[in-house]
Amino acid sequence: MQPLYDLFNGLASILQPELLIWCLIGVLLGTLAGALPGLGSITSMAILLPMTFGMETISALLFLMGIYQGAMYGGRISSILLNVPGDAPAVVTTFDGYPLTKQGKAGYALTLSAIASFIGGTIGFIGLVFLTAPIADLALIFGSPEYFALMAFALIATSGLVSAKPLKPIIAMLIGLLIAVVGADPLSGTERYTFGFLQLWDGIDFVVVAVGVFGLSEVFIRMENSIDMDEMSKKIPFSDLYPKFREVMKDFWTITRSSLIGFFFGALPGAGATITTFLVYDVEKKLSKTPEEFGKGATKGLSGPEAASNATVGGALIPLFSLGIPGSGTTAILLGALLMLGLQPGPQMFQESGDIIWAAIAGLFLANILLLIVNTALVPMLALMIRKINAYLNPIIAILCVIGIYMLNNSMFDVGLMILFGVIGYILRKYSFPLAPLVLAVILGPMLEENLTQSLLMSNEGISIFFTRPISLTLILITFLILFIPLLKNAFRSKKKRDIDLYQ
């Protein structure tokens, strides 16, 4: 019961008007920044971090927790309303969030997303309070071979390669891996596919690819097809802006299951919300009785990844607080903030600065509550906005894409790349190629290469290192299993069909 005692002490210490206001400001600024394509939680926190200079330690931590939670949700706003992912984890939100908007259910989708995010964040918070020690021990077991096997499993399991028609997903995945290897070789420093451009030496930023293939290609598709906006423009009764209680309960097990998966993967350094959202989406699609609805506005395809994404917040803080290891890019920024505030994350931090850390953990839950209140209150305004501006959506999406990408590195070269990937995304969509395998390969490609290289350097016996470590071997076996089961099913169906034809 000690964690509960510490938590209540932390909660009591932050229930002051000034601290509540700083947390609310963090939530609002984080939501606003996260909604801008290309910013996301990492860039948002990095941009807003200087505002903490001169703040009291607890005020600064509550402000940062508010930004973290707000930015994680903010990326979903542009995904749902405009089909432009605000950050990497928000890519999956576009799959079913934007189709709901096109059906005139923008408010419904935003509210469902906020509720699922709140539940996921709450489960992640509970896990952070009670499970820090055991999950931190598990995370310590993972080395490069385990992470390579985990990334390979995630790529195969979530990219659609196990479908009945894997050719197009395979081609899309290979395009993504080709994009991922652009830049200097991490081991030798040799340039690869840079074509003489110095800007490509550090590789191609994932956000440039995601905003291009999803956001800008949407502009091209809309211009070509002259999408009928009547459904999006029709007036929606106030009662229809919010999902009814029974509608939320219909997705209860999806949200709970996805939150637990998100929390677990969030606690593994390097796994992050992006991989988790793709994985959860694939899991829910496989478990669904109506998988054909996914990609057309399935509520489970929206609520599951949203819950998982916010649950990773609590999970990602476990290795940061207990081991001093950032669990994600955002917690890497938070690590710098903690050091700047005179705190040293690691095993001794709870003994040396326990009162401050428990106040920060309580602040995470407070930020989650404020996020739900603020964003559900804003739903009518956002739903009204999408009805009023639908005639101007093409230029708005294009401008947001350009501004978001330019702000990444203040580079017009990135904007040019984004336009190129917009054209590529448009062509792929025209010929019904799935974009998810491409995007996932761009995300996982560098991690796969890095962990493969480190694993081979650790081993004197080549790839045998992957088969001599229990966790990596288990993950590889599971990967092969999920890869070959559909092939065996297809072979069995073909044989059964031949037997029936022969009998007839």
Image (spheres, rainbow, N blue to C red):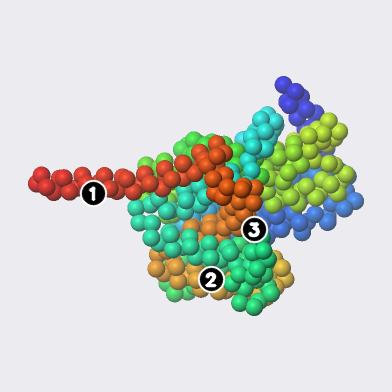
Q: Secondary structure at mark 3?
A: helix
**Residue at point 53%, 53% (across, down):** 93
Q: Which mark is residue 35?
A: 3
Residue, disc 2: 422
| Residue 313 visible here | no
From what the image shows, is residue 193 above or below residue 312?
below
The amino acid type of the residue labelled 2 equals Gly
Badge 1 crowding class, 10 Å Cα cut-off, few under 14, some 14 to 19, many 20 or more, is few
The amino acid type of the residue labelled 1 equals Ser
From what the image shows, is residue 111 above or below residue 235?
above
In depth, the one of 106 and 356 nearer the eye is 356
| Residue 197 visible here | yes
Alpha carbon separation for disc pair 2 and 3: 20 Å
Q: Secondary structure at mark 1?
A: helix
Q: Which mark is residue 494?
A: 1
Residue 216, by quadrant, is: bottom right
Chain-order first, disc 2 or disc 3: 3
In depth, the one of 23 and 244 nearer the eye is 23
Residue 209, by quadrant, is: bottom right
**Residue at point 53%, 56% (across, down):** 440
Chain-order first, disc 1 or disc 2: 2
